[in-house]
Amino acid sequence: MTEWDEYKTIFHSLQEDILVTKTDGTIVKVSEGTGAVYDINAADLMGRSVYDLEREGLFTPLATPKVVESHERATFVQTLKGGKKLLVTALPVFNNESELVRIVSYSHDVTELMEIKAGMEEMTVEMERVRDELTRLKQQNEGEFIAKSEQMRKILATASQVAGVDVNVLLLGESGVGKTELAKMMHEKSERSSGPFIEVNCGAIPDSLFEAELFGYEGGSFTGATKGGKKGFAELAADGTLFLDEVGELSLANQVKVLKLIQKKRFYKVGGRKEIYSDFRLISATNKHLKESVEQKLFREDLYFRLNVVPLTIPPLRERKEDITPLLQSFLDHFTTRYKRKKVLDRGVLHELNKLEWKGNVRELMNLVERLVVTAPDTIILPSDLPESYQQIISSYSEMNNFEEPLAVTMEKVEKERLEQAKQKFQTTTKIAEALGISQPTVVRKLKKYRIK
């Protein structure tokens, strides 16, 4: 067997789809596995133009023009006749004068993976919907505020002081700090507690529907309107509290409508001619810096001053660490009662959770406790029961704060961990080198150094 015959035999023994074209798209080499992938005789592809094959609907998009244009490696998803999906990788081949002369492409069938991905995306959307509904229900049943920190005690004292006065209050703070719960507490401590608490999420209502949702509408006032009309949030809040959450998301046009409502508490339904008066108390909330929005002309200054009569800024949980442990215990009591499961937190868990920054604030803390109550296998919730993502964060904090260990030792630990992860995923030293951006000999040397087999 000649050397050429040997290369030819090796080429056709490969199971993957391998296809070689000229820069004009003419196919000059094709492996026998390609025929099975494209459901066509491999020999019939020789000499054909990939542009003609695309017009015939065999596959799309093409690898050749991508590489010809960029002169670089290209990876993309290709769709075949019948809907099959391929993950295609195309490589440029240059001659001694650095001229592009060939494009080599190979592929793997990822149809099933793409279907799984689509299914997971649909499941994620549904889970988000369910989670939002659960959050709404949980918020309706939350008890009094827990405040051990001096910051929160001052906020609660001020909130209790102004609760009985019909003054406009603006609640500020990051998402999840408890603005909605504080608004409910103020309502319950006010003389309007027997009236309704109407919550309006300004960021969740489409701009075009906001006026109809806020003021209501008469029957037949627009296509799709309910026959008998509908009361708006402003009318429903009569003798109670109107809570405008995420007020910073309002468009400038809708800000004008809210301003007029606050000034007179009178309005017309969409399509209506009768002026309606609604005696409500207004509380607003936002996680945006409204003063900056005013300076950027994104929020009306006159509306800002109307809302900002008594501002209350709720600090994030990371700035009131004293509240973490009592909140943990409160949520634990709540969820063990709800799910009828006896659980206690190990001291190690309390210690580790107090280290975290809680970017999702109280809401994140509550969701974690609920998860631990339903997933921990034993009565005592241990550090090992924490979700892996939290364990990784805690571990990284511990490593960063370990100043007894020399920097070189810490760097070696990180390097070894990265190599172990890459070895599990890529198997070969060539692919590991490509993934980590180092040479293949370096990979071999470091694997030997750290005794990674």
Image: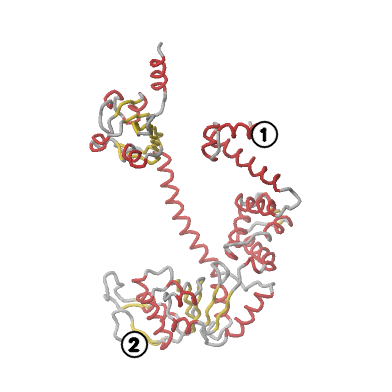
Q: Quadrant of the N terminus?
A: top left
| Left or right of 147 in this view: 37 | left
| Left or right of 439 in this view: 5 | left
Residue 171 place in picture, x, y as percent: 54, 76
| Left or right of 23 in this view: 152 | right
Corner quadrant of residue 16: top left
Residue 122 visible somewhere in the drawing = yes
Residue under the image location 36 percent in, 71 percent down: 207
Corner quadrant of residue 363: bottom right
Contact (Cβ within 8 Å) of mark 1 with mark 2: no
From the viewer's side, name the closer residue of 432 and 243. 432
Q: Earlier in the sequence, mark 1 or mark 2?
A: 2
SS state under label 2: strand
Residue under the image location 39 percent in, 16 percent down: 4
From the viewer's side, name the closer residue of 406 and 387. 406
Q: Nearer the viewer, mark 1 or mark 2?
A: 1
Residue under the image location 68 percent in, 66 percent down: 321
Residue under the image location 66 percent in, 73 percent down: 147
Q: Quadrant of the C terminus?
A: top right
Residue under pointer 2: 275
Corner quadrant of residue 449: top right
Residue under pointer 1: 449
Residue 65 vertical placement versus 198 (above, below): above
SS state under label 1: helix
Crowd rating for badge 1 (residues with CA inside 10 Å; few <14, some 14–19, many 20+): few
